[in-house]
Amino acid sequence: MSEIIVTVNDNSLLPVLEKAISLLRGVVKVSVRTEKSKNDGRTDRLPEDIKSLMGVASSISQEQIESDERLKYLMEK
């Protein structure tokens, strides 16, 4: 027996996909498993250089953004 794993972004498609797959010849069982997003907001698994950039970005004040035209342009994008 073999399995096929299908990943979808839109959970509203699950009932239709489940029904369509169950109608295929040779399909014995269809099961749906939903998972939480792998990005759970944890930063402890990020590389150190990314952590340091996050630290730098969080220390920039609004006054610094307003005074630097390049930074202001980037932040408005």
Image (tube, rainbow, N blue to C red):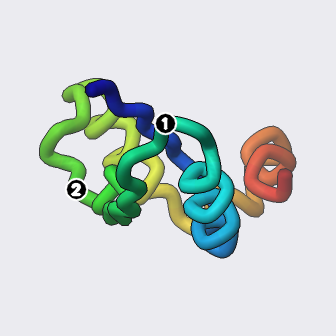
Q: Which numbered marker is on residue 42?
A: 2
Q: Which numbered marker is on residue 26?
A: 1
Q: Where is residue 61 in the image (x, y as percent from the top left)?
A: 53, 65
> Which of the two marks, 2 or 1, is nearer to us in this view?
1
Q: Which numbered marker is on residue 46?
A: none
In the rendered image, the vertical position of residue 20 relative to residue 7, given as above or below: below
**In terms of secondary structure, where does tag 1 sit?**
loop
Q: Distance between the residues labelled 2 and 1?
A: 42 Å
Judge from the rendering whether residue 3 lies leftward or rightward of residue 21; answer left or right.
left
Judge from the rendering whether residue 33 lies leftward or rightward of residue 4; answer left or right.
left
In the rendered image, the vertical position of residue 70 relative to residue 22, given as above or below: above
Q: Where is residue 69 in the image (x, y as percent from the top left)?
A: 84, 46
**In terms of secondary structure, where does tag 2 sit?**
loop
Q: Position of residue 65 (x, y in %)?
A: 69, 58
Q: In which quarter of the image is residue 30?
A: bottom left
| Circle 1 residues within 10 Å: few <14, some 14–19, many ≥20 | few
Q: Can residue 45 be seen in this view?
A: yes
Identify which residue, 20 or 49, lies in the foreground.
Answer: 20
Residue drawn 66% across the image and 74% down it? 12
**Circle nearer the N terminus (2, 1):** 1
| Three-letter residue code for mark 2 | Arg
Judge from the rendering whether residue 51 lies leftward or rightward of residue 17; answer left or right.
left
Identify which residue, 40 or 68, lies in the foreground.
Answer: 40
In the rendered image, the vertical position of residue 22 relative to residue 56, given as above or below: below
Residue drawn 51% across the image and 45% down it? 7
Q: Where is residue 71 in the image (x, y as percent from the top left)?
A: 73, 45
Q: Residue furthest left?
A: 44
Identify which residue, 32 or 48, lies in the foreground.
Answer: 32
| Three-letter residue code for mark 1 | Gly
Residue drawn 32% across the image and 51% down it? 38
Q: Quadrant of residue 22?
A: bottom right
